[in-house]
Amino acid sequence: MKTTVERLEGNQVALEVEVGQERVEQALDQAFRKVAQQVRVPGFRPGKAPRRVIEMRVGKELLYQEALDDLIPRVYTEAISESGIKPIDMPELDILEMEDGKPLRFKAVVEVEPEVTLGEYKGIAATKQIERITNADVDRVLEEMRERSAQLVTTDRQEIQTGDFAIIDFTGYIDEQPFPGGAAQGYTLEIGAGQFIPGFEEQLVGSEPGETKQVTVTFPTDYHATELAGKEARFDVKIHEIKEKSYPALNDDFAKDLGDFETLLELRADIRQRLEDAAAKDAQNTLEVDLTQKAVDLAQVDIPDKMVELQIDHKIQHLERDLQYSGLDKERYLEILGTTEEELRSRMWEEAENEVKTTLVLEAIVAKEGITVTDEEIDERIDSTVQDSPHADTLRSYWESQKRSLRNNMLLEKAVALLVDNGEITEVVVDRPEEDPNEDLETAEEATESEDTR
């Protein structure tokens, strides 16, 4: 097989391929045997008729087409591999010569990955910001642990206060008619958490166990259940109990209950170490992203629209998979966002384009630096990935089938590591950014929106 490569405009390449007569004849023989099994010729058993008889019956053109359908894809793949080009789309094929006793010649024009002109990717200046871990951070984690260990206990108080947990039955009515999703028995409601319709929880403050109270509220106009939006509702609420959270004391016993710790001091030291490890990992990840983006910005490459479209397709597929885990489909997701798939794809364009360029630049660094990944390194990565997993055999089988993709990912990882190793890195310790005071409010609003019609 002979292959010539010609670079065309617009990231296109023309491959002219010549396939030897002997290989063409082998493909024709295979095509004949396949067609002979399907054609009934009087006087011959299936598959036993001579080739010349089959040719006369179905026409030589059919045999050639059958042979080409099998031969050209395999030969094209070999030509691509030998030439080292990377197609991003299906080729346009043109048969140049196909005659008895002569080689087969065809031309394939295909759009390929663009050439990358690398900028300076060694010696890039960057700052590695490591978050300072303070006693307040340790205290915050301890309080989260106490929160998870808290238990609800019945209080002796006879009036509901904000922060209490009321055990209630309720039934909701609109126009004196119960509505679906508007009733529950033995429901535990945290007063002031904003779980229910605005105004509902506030009207229970001051109520006593055993009391039945009427609560009147109006559903928000943008309520997710459109059949209830903007309507006034009355709820009959029966209060059974008032409970409050009981927190464990922060002492050595608390530490012992949480793990292999003898004292609270040991627990605090463990928390600090884990926070510092996480901060160091986050700082390293951020540094790698920063250096990679700078190397990408310094490189020049003309990204074909087709590559961006394919990357957006990939992102949409991941989105649909994630939505399935959330119990949503793409259509419902788009409806919630109030957008169309075309608009969503348009918003994804810039990010997808940068992702494509990032991959191309890192691949160019891999090629220029001669970076390799050995089979042993891949096996070690698989071993570390599946170890201690209760589904180790299934995971190993999966990763064994994904070795090619895994190798490519590891090559890109090594390219990023090269950027870090050769970067001019300044390390600084920084304080934790101040938290957004509206964050808790936004979280509460999201929780309210996710509730049912209650």
Image: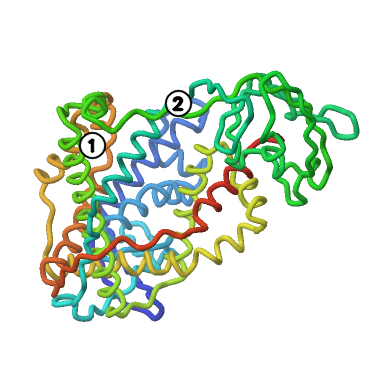
Residue 14 visible in rendering: yes
Image x and y of residue 336, in percent: 65, 50
3D distance between C-alphas at marks 2 and 1: 42 Å
Left or right: where 426 falls relative to 300 = left
Amino acid residing under circle 2:
Pro
Element carrying mark 2 = loop
Relative to 136, say whether 119 is above or below. Answer: below
For label 2, the residue is 46
Identify the mark at residue 400; answer none if there is no mark.
1
Instruction: Characterize the local packing of mark 2: few (<14), some (14-19) or many (20 or more) Cα atoms within 10 angstroms.
Output: some
- Quarter of the image holding residue 243? top right
In the rendered view, would you say 155 is above or below 347?
Answer: above
Residue 403, position as x, y percentages in the image: 23, 43
Foreground residue among 76 and 374: 374
What amino acid is found at the position of numbered circle 1 in the picture?
Glu
Q: In this view of the protein, which residue sits in the foreground, 150 or 53?
A: 150
Q: How many marks?
A: 2
Kindly identify the residue that appears in the image at 33 percent across and 73 percent down.
Answer: 114
- Residue 434 or 320: which is nearer the viewer? 434
